[in-house]
Amino acid sequence: MPSANHAAGRPRRVALLGSTGSIGTSCLDVIDSLPEQLEAFGLCAHTRWEALLEQAHKFRPRFVAAMTSEAARQMAGKLPPDCQLLIGEEGLAELVAQPEVDVVLAAVVGAAGLTGTWLALEAGKTVAVANKETLVMAGPLVMDLAMRRGARVLPVDSEHSAIFQAMQAGSPADVRRVVLTASGGPFRGKKQADLENVSVEEALRHPTWRMGPKITVDSATLMNKALEVIEARWLFGLSPDQIDVIIHPESIVHSFVEFKDGSVLAQLSPPDMRLPIQYALLYPERVEGPARRLDWSELSTLTFEQPDAQTFPALELGYEVARRGGTCGAVLNAANETAVSRFLAGELGFLDIPRVCRAVLDEHPYSARPTLSELHALDRWARQEVLRWTRTNLCSVTA
Ligand code: MG
């Protein structure tokens, strides 16, 4: 139990995977604000080794894991004296399995985040999962591993944190449905015809949240909400028809839980990831932290509307994948990741993102009970399919 650490008179020790990204830096901000409660025990980043080095000097972790040998070569000899450099996947495994680690924050973006979460769960650790792609890709396998190892998966995604917090008011069997809120992104109210030629810059202009580029594009297509439907399905063991989505442009209500007696509980706060990060790291404790607070003198109207499934077909893809399960999540996730990267590179149009995801999902060899290595293989296959689709598409445009 987390409180045991405090009883032992020391902060909770955090292994932070993906320390230089948007969630990683927010996590370090939380740790910096709560030195009595939290300690950066290990840091790991994939490519930005200079930022990682700077973090190591500021937070003085016991371990730093570099995922590439190039990053390790660059950092060698430049770390603080009592900080050990670990390298590659083996180093990552060593870091998360350290007996002193109390909680692992998995904040690596995309399918690449699965490895760290998997290794940490294998080591029986509590994992705060900020990487929804892990649960989208391999939800049943991940939850099963956690159960077998007696490890705990705690949500960091703001909607799932809200659901998790509201669920404390009853027993899981008493939950009738959950309602995920969505800001609607920068293109709320638009129709398909308006979106054919939107630029990368327009898609990256999120109205309420400041996040990395991948998730910001996902918010614009509503693919982010589709992935969150799948994430909620596996994380909370809900059936897809118990999960609703509602558009809430203010991003103040982070989700609702409806219990069978008709009571609906919600969690509200300004859009600031430091709160769900802190809640997951210190669960079940609540302390004063750095997250922004609701200003009740400024709060006036909270609005809600139904999502536009015609304009944002990604949402329906999410429900379909949540219903079919099996290999679908890994395929949708990989197709979407690659489509978003091609959109950011100017090679695909905005509306092509759900189109190519639909095409690759329909083509893939479905299986209901895949192994982890089958999911990895399909992940690679789906990426190639999107690249092939993109090339064909480019040819037809330039012809
Ligand atoms: Mg979210």
Image (cartoon, rainbow, N blue to C red):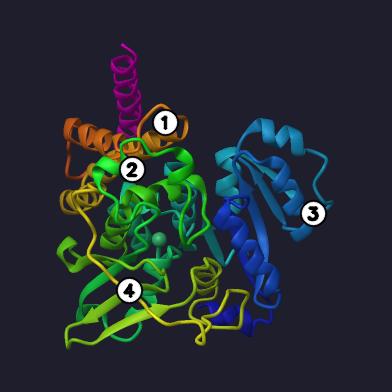
How far apart are the alpha carbons under marks 1 and 2? 14 Å
- The residue beneath circle 2 is 333
Instruction: Tell me the quarter of the picture where residue 177 sits.
Output: bottom left
Query: Which SS type dominates the magenta stretch?
Result: helix
- The residue beneath circle 1 is 342
- Given contact means CB atoms under 8 Å apart, are the residues at marks 2 and 4 in contact? no
Neighbour class for label 3 at 10 Å: few (<14), some, many (≥20)?
some
- The residue beneath circle 4 is 303
Q: Is residue 111 left or right of residue 303?
A: right
How far apart are the alpha carbons under marks 4 and 3? 45 Å
Q: Nearer the viewer, mark 2 or mark 3?
A: 2
Check residue 266 for magenta coloring. Answer: no
The image shows residue 355 at horizontal and vertical percentages of 24, 35
**Residue type marked 1:** Arg
Q: Give the magenta-colored segment's residue range.
A: 370-399
In primary-sequence order, the first of circles 2 and 3 is 3
In primary-sequence order, the first of circles 4 and 3 is 3
In primary-sequence order, the first of circles 1 and 2 is 2
Instruction: Tell me the quarter of the picture where residue 291 sits.
Output: bottom right
The image shows residue 338 at horizontal and vertical percentages of 39, 34
Identify the element where label 4 is drawn: loop
Q: Nearer the viewer, mark 1 or mark 4?
A: 4
Q: Nearer the viewer, mark 1 or mark 2?
A: 1
In primary-sequence order, the first of circles 3 and 1 is 3
Identify the element where label 3 is drawn: helix
How far apart are the alpha carbons under marks 2 and 3? 35 Å
Q: Is mark 4 within 8 Å of ligand 1?
A: no
Q: Residue at x 35, y 33 (%)?
A: 349
**Residue type marked 4:** Thr
In primary-sequence order, the first of circles 1 and 4 is 4
Neighbour class for label 2 at 10 Å: few (<14), some, many (≥20)?
many
Above or below 144: residue 5: below
